[in-house]
Amino acid sequence: GEEEEEGDRAAMRWKQNTLKNASLKKNTLRQNLAAFIYGDSAVNVEEKEEEGESGEEDDLFFSKKPAPKEEDTIDNFHLETFEEVDWDDDDLMSSLKSQYFVDAAGGEDSDDSAVYGDFEEVDEDGAEKTKKGEPSNGEDAGDVDEEDAEARKQKKEAFDKEWDEKGPARAKDKYRDEEEDVFRKARDEQNAENATMRDRVLRGMDAKERAEIEGILPGTYIRAEFHNVPMEFIKFFEPRYPVIAGGIKPIAEEGTSFIRAKVKRHRWKRGVLKSNDPVVFSIGWRRFQSLPVYSIEDNGGRNRLLKYTPEHLHCNASFFGPITPQGTGVVMCQSLSRTKASFRVSATGVVTELSAHFPIVKKLKLVGEPFHIQKNTAFISGMFNSELEVSKFLNAGLRTVSGIRGSVKKAVRKIPDVNKAIPDGTFRATFEDKILRSDLVFLRAWVPIEPVRFVSTASTLLQAAKTRGSDDNAPWRMRTVREVREERNLPIPLQKDSLYNPIERPTRRFNTLKIPVSLERKLPFASQPKNLPQKASGPRVKTDRDRALAVVMEPEEKKEYTLMQMVKAVRKDKEETEKATKKRKREEKGKVEAREVEKRRVGEAKRKKMKYLMEAVKGKGKDDGKKSRR
């Protein structure tokens, strides 16, 4: 209880002697409220406007509201007499209201009124309309305030009703300038009349004729702005030549990477494609030239290099180019020239994957000969040319012709004064068994191959219109080695190691097998050498044993033996006759079949020729019909 009463007395202590404290500070508080709110500069501007703005042109349309008299300002009231002020006096309340920037009656005054004063709007007839409820030309101020308040109230109610029914946009349209509405209405009527007349005249024409007369209408084209355009594009620009404008994703499609595509040689393309030959790729809306490397995957998952593309099989083509989404179609052309008669499309396919590196290997087979043999160790020469090459193939597997396996151990260092006779690249190898000097040693390895990082964008639009059909000498295109040789009349270089020479191998003569006598005695009878004469391939020669065992036949036995010999002779003669007859018939049948095959081939060639002639005649007739319609 006592603590709460003490708190209430402390809270009300600041209200004591309020009038006494205010009278002490009346000198500082006695000032113009306009200067207190807006500053001295606003008061100075107001004083200047009071002195001389009546002669300006704006006075024809606006008249300044008279400033309040000095006797009505709050500065003339004394704070110590506030207790004696009659706050119910309407004149006193009006004089106080005029000192603030908000009009309590209408709510339309802005903060500019304290600086520039209140203005009155003048209509087209020259009559002044009071805007803010001030008296004009001697009218009663009270009546004007009531009329303006009523007018503003009706106007606000009408605006709110329009807002609720038709929305803010339609509500604002109602209060637009009448002259603007009249002009817009007249313009719309004129445009509608012109459109009706134009449609009536051009209604019977097709789209092409209408475009020639009235041009390309707005809405059927777009306007684009390009930056960093090469000078040649503008210099050789051809309006009749179509230009395809495409967009790319800055992050995903502006970079380059290795691309692998599954391709197949086109069946109308003559010949095959060679690895590392420049080819023009058309992928999406991009056209660029690159050097593809062809490969095929074997059963072990290894991608083996192909020097040429297969004729009727798919293969992988790895090349360097701009990043392209998987599944995009690929068209490959060796040349874009329109002057050549051959079919331009070389191969077609689809993009399968993208990667920074594709493992492609090439088969390498090296051959060497034994230089020196010591039991299971042998020194091999002729396979490498230096110690550095040997160091790259350490522990590589070796195999001889007879199937003996081995591995590379270490290169033999050549010392000038000690081992001059040792060839360069000789190395030491170990084998499962002792090899012979006549054996050939093979090393089979796989060498990694990486496609060349080359890509050149086809910039045909930067060439003159006359040279776009022939890209033989285009600056962006890399030519093949064959084209360079044909232009400069250079012969194909001949390498003797690449020629196929007949292989002449001397007949090997092995020494006879000599078994020691002591070992021969220990061998079983089946394994002992037999000193019997070798059987000849001709008729049997009678030996002494045969003569000693001669059989003397009886007369009856001799007749039977003679008869059997005669039967065998007749049978043998008959078999030879039948064999000759079959051979003759087989030859005759082969000749007949050869004649039928040749006849069939000639007929097929004639049918193809007539088919092509008929297709050419039909195509020519269609072209003539198109020309006549034109």
Image: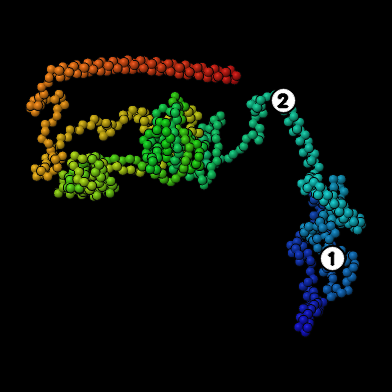
Extreme residue in the bottom direction? 2
Q: Which residue is mark 2?
A: 201
Question: Disc 1 and disc 2: Cα gap in Å?
Answer: 74 Å
- Give above or below for 575 relative to 268: above
Tell me which residue sits at (28%, 33%) in the image.
498
Q: Is 415 on the left-hand or right-hand side of 200?
A: left
Q: Residue at x 44, y 24 (%)?
A: 341
Secondary element at image label 1: helix
Q: Position of residue 584 (x, y in %)?
A: 29, 15
Q: How is the image coloured?
A: rainbow
Q: Closer to the camera, 386 or 607?
A: 607
x and y percent of residue 407 in the render? 26, 47
Type of the residue with mark 2: Val
What's the residue at 55%, 41% (across, down)? Answer: 247
Compare residues 484 and 46 and report the one nearer the observer: 484
Q: Which residue is mark 1?
A: 96
Query: Is any atom of residue 257 visible in this view?
Result: no
Give the residue type at disc 1.
Leu
Q: Position of residue 421 (x, y in %)?
A: 16, 44
Q: Categorize mark 2 by other alpha carbons within 10 Å: few (<14), some (14-19), many (20+).
A: few
